[in-house]
């Protein structure tokens, strides 16, 4: 296995790389090898204060930049990002174990695509318009605090940072301490693109020390958080005293409803496609179709497809061509998934394939067997809780009403999937799902469509024009025409 073992990172505040040698440091583990591949300094509330002061000062001028100036900046960032794409992909594979193909084609590419999308939206975004006797003006909200996760590290900062810069906001950012090296490369990209000093500031650290300091800070005007629902609750509580805007993209337990009117071939394709989508990124996706709802009359048909599909998925060294799945991100994550699998076994669900322990032939690294349970009751813990791993629950339903009732009987509401031959029927079920994004008949993600969920999956939206709105305040100039 070929890999870097000398990754390092530091803080970036007020346009400068900060000397952090005297800070306590945290080792970062490659989950494929369990070896240390680098370290990061751990910040504290004082470092956040320094970053906020820089962002506050920079906001005065950056908020006044023209659309053309911000377009030019975003284009420079996109150009520099494209130049560093290979470095970004390599860092993501090292820090979180994503297979090389996934790091290159999806993980690293996603950050670039968010900047390109923001450029397209900014070109025509309406910051000012007349509404009856009032002139309505959209203005940047101010200093924004970003707390981002490890599972799609540059995707999740890209869909926050690109619209923030496009709308004239400044930023204080804490990347995940689990996957921090892609963040370092992104800051190098921003520095090379000559982002004005103080406009984007990065402080490494953990949630209690740095994340909480960002959420609580009285001079931060909005916080955008992506992560677990429990952590999202903590962010919202920390932010409450300063009445700041909080947007959250949290967990999910998405339903994938396969209708009974599909031919045998299309039924198999829909079931297999859902399984493969679930297992991308080792199942570490908040919008994963982890609850597979199939007609009772076709349960055995679905079980056969699920089992055959999962057993064809190759798991192993992320640098080896052809491996579909690498490891999950950490020992903590591995243990959590093992506990969920044990819970499924203890609940009496039928284990179709996979199960406890590492896949055969892998004696190190945090690898998980692609796992499927059938005869799952919708009230079992494995059907209600987000597992965040390559584990699917096959649930049978009587009719469309039963499928919708069970799909909506969950605290989460991030995404949903419906496949069927009758497009009107598919659309009807999609409309009945209480979730923010519904994929019809295998439709893929659209990076200009709003991303976000209902219920415990969070609030606010990322991507597209709706993503811009989260970074804007609305001012009504009455009597002005």
Image: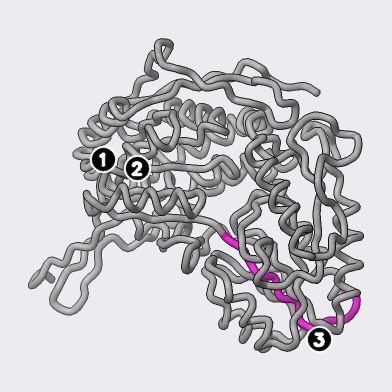
Badge 1: few (under 14), some or many (20 or more) residues near its Cα, within 10 Å? many
Magenta segment range?
Answer: 252-265
Whether residue 301 is situated above or below residue 313 in the rendered picture: below
Q: Work out whether residue 245 or residue 449 is closer to the camera in this orientation and state it.
A: 245
Pick whichever, 58 or 453, lies toward us.
453
The nearer-to-camera label among 3 and 1 is 1
Residue 183 relative to residue 390: left or right: left
Residue at the far top: name it. Answer: 22
The mark closer to the camera, 2 or 1, is 1
Q: Which residue is mark 2?
A: 145
Q: Is residue 81 left or right of residue 368?
A: left
Query: Neighbour class for label 2 at 10 Å: few (<14), some, many (≥20)?
Result: many
C-alpha distance separating marks 2 and 3: 48 Å
Neighbourhood count class around disc 3 (C-alpha, 10 Å): few under 14, some 14–19, many 20 upward: few
Q: Residue at x 65, y 38 (%)?
A: 329
Residue 115 visible in rendering = no
Q: Is residue 300 above or below residue 351?
A: below
- Asked if one can make out residue 32 in the rendered structure from this viewpoint, the answer is yes
User: Counting residues from the N terminus, which is met first, the one under dot 2 or under dot 1?
Assistant: 2
Could you tell me which secondary element the residue under label 2 belongs to?
strand
- Does 132 appear above or below 211? below
Helix, strand, or loop for circle 3? loop
Quarter of the picture containing the N terminus is top right
The residue at the far front in this view is: 346
Magenta stretch encompasses residue 255: yes
Frontmost residue, 243 versus 161: 243
Q: From mark 3 to mark 1, how far is it between C-alphas?
A: 54 Å
Q: Which residue is mark 3?
A: 261
**Which secondary structure lies at badge 1?**
loop
Q: Which residue is mark 1?
A: 217
How is the protein colored in the picture? one colour
Q: Earlier in the sequence, mark 3 or mark 1?
A: 1
């Amino acid at each position: 296995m070929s890999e870097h073992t000398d990754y390092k990172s530091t803080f970036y505040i007020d346009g400068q790389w900060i000397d952090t040698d005297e800070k306590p440091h945290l080792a970062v583990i490659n989950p494929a090898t369990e070896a240390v591949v680098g370290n990061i300094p751990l910040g504290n509330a004082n470092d956040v204060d320094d970053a906020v002061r820089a962002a506050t000062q920079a906001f005065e001028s950056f908020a006044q930049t023209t659309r053309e100036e911000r377009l030019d900046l975003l284009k420079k960032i996109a150009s520099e990002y494209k130049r560093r794409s290979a470095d970004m992909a390599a860092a993501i594979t090292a820090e979180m174990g994503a297979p090389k193909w996934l790091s290159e084609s999806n993980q690293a590419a996603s950050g670039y695509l968010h900047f390109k999308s923001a450029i397209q939206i900014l070109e025509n975004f309406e910051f000012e318009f007349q509404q009856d006797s009032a002139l309505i003006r959209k203005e940047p909200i101010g200093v924004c605090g970003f707390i981002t996760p490890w599972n799609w590290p540059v995707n999740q900062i890209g869909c926050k940072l690109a619209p923030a810069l496009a709308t004239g906001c400044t930023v204080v950012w804490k990347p995940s301490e689990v996957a921090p090296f892609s963040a370092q490369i992104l800051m190098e990209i921003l520095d090379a693109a000559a982002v004005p000093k103080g406009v984007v500031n990065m402080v490494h650290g953990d949630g209690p020390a740095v994340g909480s300091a960002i959420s609580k800070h009285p001079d931060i005007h909005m916080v955008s958080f992506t992560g677990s629902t429990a952590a999202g609750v903590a962010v919202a509580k920390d932010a409450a005293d300063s009445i700041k805007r909080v947007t959250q993209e949290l967990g999910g337990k998405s339903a994938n409803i396969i209708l009974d009117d599909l031919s045998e071939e299309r039924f198999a394709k829909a079931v297999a496609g859902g399984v493969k989508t679930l297992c991308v990124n080792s199942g570490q996706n908040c919008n994963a179709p982890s609850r597979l709802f199939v007609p009772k009359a076709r349960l055995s048909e679905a079980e056969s497809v699920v089992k055959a599909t999962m057993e064809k998925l190759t798991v192993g060294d992320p640098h080896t061509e052809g491996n579909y799945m690498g490891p999950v991100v950490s020992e903590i994550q591995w243990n959590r998934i093992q506990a969920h699998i044990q819970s499924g076994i203890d609940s009496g669900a039928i284990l179709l394939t996979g199960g406890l322990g590492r896949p055969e032939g892998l004696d190190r690294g945090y690898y998980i067997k692609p796992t499927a349970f059938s005869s799952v009751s919708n009230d079992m813990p494995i059907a209600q809780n987000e597992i965040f791993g390559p584990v699917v629950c096959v649930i049978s339903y009587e009719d469309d009403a039963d499928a919708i009732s069970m799909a909506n009987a969950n605290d989460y509401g991030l995404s949903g999937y419906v496949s069927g031959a009758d497009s009107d029927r598919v659309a009807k079920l999609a409309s009945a799902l209480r979730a923010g994004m519904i994929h019809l008949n295998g439709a893929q993600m659209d990076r200009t469509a709003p991303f976000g969920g209902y219920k415990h999956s969070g609030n606010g939206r990322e991507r597209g024009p709706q993503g811009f709105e989260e970074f804007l305040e609305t001012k009504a100039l009455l009597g002005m025409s």
